[in-house]
Image: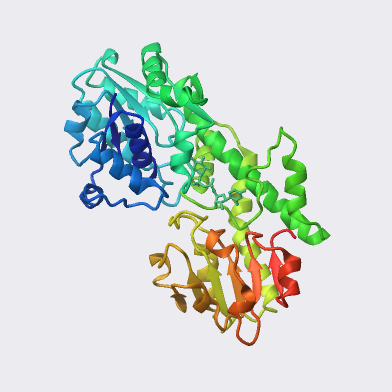
Amino acid sequence: MKLCMIGTGYVGLVSGVCFADLGNNVICVDKDIKKIDLLLKGKVPIYEPGLTELVNKNYKNKRLKFSTNLKESIKVSDIIFICVGTPTKKGGSSADLSQIFSAAKEISLSLNKFKIIVTKSTVPVTTGDQIEKILKKRHSSKKFSVVSNPEFLREGEAIRDFTYPDRIVVGSNDNKSNRLMNNLYSPLISKGAHYINTSRRAAELIKYASNAFLATKITFINEIANLCENTDINVEDISIGMGLDKRIGGRFLRAGPAYGGSCFPKDTKAITSTADKFKTNLSVIKSVIKSNENRSNLLLNKVYKILNNKVKNKKITFLGVTFKANTDDMRDSSSLTMIPTLSKKGAKIRYFDPTGFKKEFLKIKNVLNIDNIKESVQGADLVIIHTEWNDFKSINFKNLVKGKKFIIYDMRNIYSPTKIRNQGFKYYSIGR
Ligand code: UDX
């Protein structure tokens, strides 16, 4: 099939490349000329393991194209995927849909034959209805069908999550578009993916409800970890003991710092804002948002306690600053709260991250990026393991230390407390 992906971010580029790899002809369109130029040179503007190879393979066999010409790309395609950003509105909670509606207007101007218009971006319930209204201004409803097909891609695992999805959700109100979408996804369905067809609004809500539930699950175990710390219990025992119950499941039960990323914080706010609009109070998700927002300060209070409330001039090293491993994404990373706060209290901060220097810390006083672990911890008073990169999973701390041993605060529970303490280090972690 001929597909047009509007937007070449984490969703549009990954989905477009993977659709091309399934044998479709795909044009990935972006208005950012710099991004398209990079892609045309075989360079991928996002950090996603395996993506560069897949882009180059499909570009070479001419199934994948890049363009800034949205009009032409829409005209030659059968299915148009809207994959633009829906960030949280500045100072509010609801999703900013301006890019969605401008894409819809562009599509309306270029609709030369029947097309399926798919929202793959995460959009609030009834967005599909609003897109339909925009198209109906110029076209009969026979000329298009608006479908919701949310993605469930995790950054760092996006290609795997596309290729082996737990489920494919297609919200469409007509059989023809459902049949075409089922056909598009048939290679994945034949490999065992569940394909479910729902109403369009249900598909829109499934995405938000899924992310909000995952955020709830993480916040739940983070709060249980707080209790474990006060009752001398190991939270990992709780995660295992709970997770073996098939009704609960063991995944997303790892206690850690506040959850971050471009989705959970945005989507939990957006679903509560949509619900408020429909006079429904999602009190559980609202408490999850609040609990997660408090978590960074809670862990900072632990840092102050570890340092006997003497933070000024203390040398603190962060190992990892991205919101999770295998991504260079800093959006809503808990380090964006912790590092500036510690800097304001007079700490001297160094950080090492496998994805390198972060512009987010450029203007923060006494924050230095070091390009290797060994140097980054030299002379440190406290080393904080913030992100669970593989690079941090087999550090021989004893070899790293010359003279006074630094304290270790392992926010990802990577190490065994007994082992590290037997090496003579003061060691703290989460919920243990
Ligand atoms: C998430 C959803 O998983 C994905 O389905 C959706 O399409 C986009 O949002 P992503 O934000 O890329 O994906 O990362 P994810 O792996 O879900 O982690 C989100 C946050 O939760 C990270 O800060 C991570 O560190 C944290 N997390 C995750 C935990 O603290 N504990 C866990 O057990 C799992």
**Is residue 355 left or right of 6 when viewed as pictured?**
right
Q: How many marks?
A: 0
Seen at 32% across and 28% down, the residue is 23
Q: Quadrant of the N terminus?
A: top left
80 is higher (above) or lower (below) than 8: above
Render colour scheme: rainbow
Residue at 64% across / 52% down in the picture?
291
Q: Position of residue 357 (x, y in %)?
A: 40, 68
Residue 304 seen in render: yes
Q: Residue furthest right?
A: 231
Residue 37 image offset from top left, x and y in percent: 21, 50
Residue shown at 74% from the left, 39% from the top: 244
> Which of 159/132 is in front?
159
Quadrant occupied by the C terminus:
bottom right
Percent x, y for residue 7? Answer: 31, 41
Residue 227 versus residue 135: which sits nearer the camera?
A: 227
Whether residue 94 is visible here, answered yes or no, is no
Q: Residue at x 49, y 44 (%)?
A: 154
**Percent coordinates x, y for residue 151 in the rendering:** 45, 35
Measured along the vertical axis of the image, is residue 332 above or below residue 361? above
123 on left or right of 229: left
Is residue 314 left or right of 124 when viewed as pictured?
right
